[in-house]
Image (cartoon, rainbow, N blue to C red):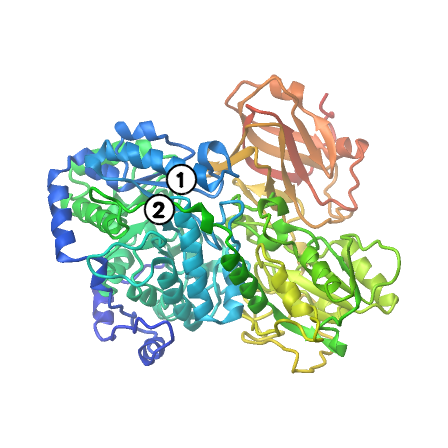
Amino acid sequence: MLRRKSGALFVTLLASVAPLSPSVAASAQNEAALATPSVWPSAASPQSITDPATEEAISRTIAEMTLEQKVGQVIQADISAISPKDLKQYPLGSILAGGNSGPYGDERATAQKWKQLVDEFRAASRESGAGIPILFGVDAVHGHSNLPGATIFPHNIGLGAARDPDLIQRIGAATAAEIAASGIEWTFAPTLAAPQDVRWGRTYEGYSSDPALIARYSSAMTLGLQGALVEGTPLPADRVAATAKHYLADGGTFEGRDQGDARISEAELVATHAQGYPPAINAGALTVMASFSSWNGVKHHGNKSLLTDVLKDRMGFKGLVVGDWNGHGQVEGCTATDCPAAINAGLDLYMAPDSWKGLYNNTLAAVRDGRIPAARLDDAVRRNLRVKYKLGLMGPQPIERGNPDVIGSDAHLELAREAVAKSLVLLKNNRSVLPIRNGASILVAGSGADNMAMQAGGWTVTWQGTDTKASDFPKGQTIGRALVDAISANGGKGVIAPDGKIAGKPDVAIIVLGEKPYAEFEGDIPNLAFTPQAEEIELIKQLKAKKIPVVVLFLSGRPMFTSKLINLADAFVAGWLPGSQGQGVADVLIAGANGKPRRDFTGRLPFAWPADARSPIGKPLFPIGYGLDYSKRIRLGRVNEKPGIDLNASDGTLLYMLRGKVSAPWHLGVDGSIASRAIDIGAQEDARQFSWSDKAGMSITGSAINLNGKLPQQAALSIDWRIDRKNDQPVRISFGGAPIDLTGYVRSLADGSANALRIPLRCFVEKGAKLDAVAAPFQIEAARGFVASIRTIRVEAGAADLPCPN
């Protein structure tokens, strides 16, 4: 295993670098730091995060706290695993709402419900824990995205294409106002990753692969969320704490693996992955989140050289360092419920969503027996209190947040519309098909034509975003609806038909397609090949045969190998994940009353666009920064369609879940009535538990794949799982859309029993499964009360003697 450099060597290397400018724009100092990759950038952390009077008040508070109260301050629990009454015995200092957690179990709760829950936790914390209120955090990563009706902005990859720091700062301010409107004061954003291998499922959370652009954006978003800090003065009621994340090099892991290992030199770690942090710290970022990932084998949650020597000492960071979801449990020698090493390394707040109780008890023991020094605990408590003071939570008259009128306001929606328009990147426009003229008739087709989930992506209402609906955002518009409205407003005619089947011949067809929603590791893929649905390719060919110009609008969380689509289309637009305001797409593609669109294409690629399916991207088809506009009449010739690798060797078509994680190219679809979380069965987080609160289905889906010729002899669907809790309702498993009743089998098992179930594929074929077009290789349907934990789902050989389930 490669080893990190010692903290002493870090300090030696850091000694000569001047502080970076806090300006939003890149300064000469930024450029000098970027040009010196062998040393770490420094920051001039604003003293306005704290002040002498506040520090004195914090010292008095700490002196009066019991050990139990101090330990409580450094632990954060998720709302799905704790209630306000628990704080009486366990005086925790922080609460979060994870991607699949909603108030009172309702993922579509109103802002009023969110505020009610926050207020209940706040009141309970003031009655315990030395009267110190809790700090409440949420993943609001592209708007207040957990909240239906909120303004949903493009994901960061699209904002990177806009190349507009002022826009980013305005989006930060709008997002903060909507978060605060629901009573919440802390968001886990911005993401400052510099993704270098876009197979990574979190690529779209990064603005760009270019560290210089990230540095410009990091200060802009921080200032937008928090405003400019003023010494001795708390943030205004419409601002929230920002989180610079995920520290460090989460975008540099080997083969783009989520929570993986960055096997890179220190020079590359600094030059590529550290540049966003000093500008965010200079702008006053109150928190930093440690990454799940590691650097040369050392997990960041336990890396003192990076968390303390670099971040706190060199960069002068005065706020708190929070962990990621049980990330401390991945540190060598630790578990999710016992990890002194993390706080000793510099972590100030354990994110222990469902492990908080055991962690609280074990951390108490570790302080009492000296494994955690008292001074380190006091410093962590001080940093938590420092942030609470800055947010106006402390004192007899805390700042009150909560003005639901600003959520989804017209001004915010117009800002999102502007951002969508600026995010679009035109890669091809042969024959000047775009903009579409006044009076034209258009067909809007494809899987994304009228699909809010696809255009919003992950982290929207739910963690994976697979069940997001247009009705979740009544002031939003799907892309298809927006295009039809825009063409109709100027005498044209538009029809939305996802399958393309309409009467008559349109003047232009706009095919909206791309990736299905995903988040985090669910989005990791083995290569960059995008496989459209077979019917979408056939539709484009039919349209071309009829001499109908075709525009392809590609929705994705990363650049992908799409050369076949590019060659078939007359115009090709990278639309990324634009969010709720599809009108921004229409503003650029559709001409207005004067014959010109409201906006031209101004977006430029934030990542290079691949010429084949290999990753990392070598010689690209289009370089970073590329993009056409309506003044550039460039005819694109035929481009390479050879993938450059054996796609069959890496397509993962027979592996659907491994160690609780869905394998590429498949995606997890979880209904809102099913809660999902990572758990341990045989090893740490080696399974995913699904709990049903109503009749619903969990599915693994993707583009339809022909399995004929790929199946082993006597193939069987193999499921390694544990039935945690049964009920008296039916349980069905489907492969390729054909269901098999497992009710009797499940009832024969004892609760908590782990077992391996193997069902011959011929059983599904007999029920109607067609192996030449499998888009849903696995689905399980159950009802309220059923709980199952799944480790592995795959197709394997050896089903010759197996009967079909009764």
| Residue displayed at 21% across by 66% down | 11
Query: Measured along the vertical axis of the image, is residue 152 above or below residue 765?
Result: below
Q: Quadrant of the rendered structure where residue 528 is?
A: bottom right
**Type of the residue with mark 2:** Arg
SS at badge 2 = loop
Say which quadrant the C terminus sits in. top right
Give the mark, 2 or 1, whose residue is nearer the N terminus. Answer: 1
Viewed as shown, does residue 638 lie left or right of 268?
right
Q: Quadrant of the rendered structure where residue 113 is?
A: top left
| Foreground of the two, 276 or 105 | 105
Residue hosting label 1: 115
Query: Measured along the vertical axis of the image, is residue 297 above or below residue 45?
Result: above
> Can residue 693 be spotted in the picture?
yes
> Can residue 255 be spotted in the picture?
no
What x and y, as percent, mark residue 25?
38, 75
SS at badge 1 = helix
Q: Quadrant of the rendered structure where residue 472 is?
A: top right
**Type of the residue with mark 1:** Lys
What x and y, as percent, mark residue 480?
70, 57
Label 2 crowd (10 A; few <14 / some 14-19 / many >=20):
many
| Residue displayed at 46% across by 42% down | 111
Residue hosting label 2: 401
Viewed as shown, does residue 117 lie left or right of 491?
left
What x and y, as percent, mark residue 195?
48, 63
Label 1 crowd (10 A; few <14 / some 14-19 / many >=20):
many
